[in-house]
Image (tube, rainbow, N blue to C red):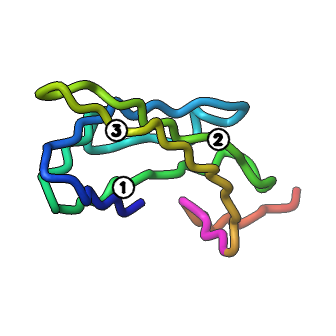
Amino acid sequence: VRLKNPSIKTLAYNATLVGRNARDFSLPEGNTVIIAPKGQTTINVEFTSRFLHPAEAVLLLISKRMGGIGGATLTFSLKSEVKHIEPAVSLRVKLLLL
């Protein structure tokens, strides 16, 4: 998720994942997002598939006041789609018939 800050003040957000499948999503760089004045940043969201069906969650970015200014609360809908599956381990087994 790419965020831009058009203001002349630094913006800070607390990122939270909520929803039915929120535990399948993670924020590897942590829950605090800082955006410099007139700058931009990217939030990486990782998904770990436990099932083949699509997973859904919501990414909430709740503003933290810095220097008297706060940004708007932002929400993003997250939906997974599994397009390709590879086995974690392959075993070759030889059966002996008695």
Tell me the tag on residue 57. 2
Q: Residue furthest bottom?
A: 84
Q: Position of residue 31 (x, y in %)?
A: 32, 33
Labelled disc at residue 44: 1
Mark before the other along the chain sequence, 1 or 3: 1
- Magenta span: 84-88
Of mark 1 and mark 2, the one earlier in the sequence is 1
Above or below 31: residue 33: below
- Disc nearer the start of the sequence (3/2): 2
- Which secondary structure, mark 2? strand
- Callout 3 amino acid: Gly
Q: Quadrant of the N terminus?
A: bottom left
Identify the amino acid type marked 2: Ala
Q: Pinpoint residue 86: horizontal percent, then vertical percent.
A: 61, 70
Q: Secondary structure at mark 3?
A: loop
Q: How many marks?
A: 3
Badge 3 local density, few (<14 within 10 Å), some, or many (20+)?
some
Measure the alpha-carbon separation of dots 1 and 3: 20 Å
Q: Is residue 86 magenta?
A: yes
Single out the residue that lies furthest toward the right: 98
Closer to us: mark 3 or mark 2?
3
Instruction: Residue at 69% x, 74% y: name it.
Output: 83
Q: Is 82 within the magenta?
A: no
Residue 42 vs residue 27: left or right?
Answer: left
Which mark identifies residue 71? 3
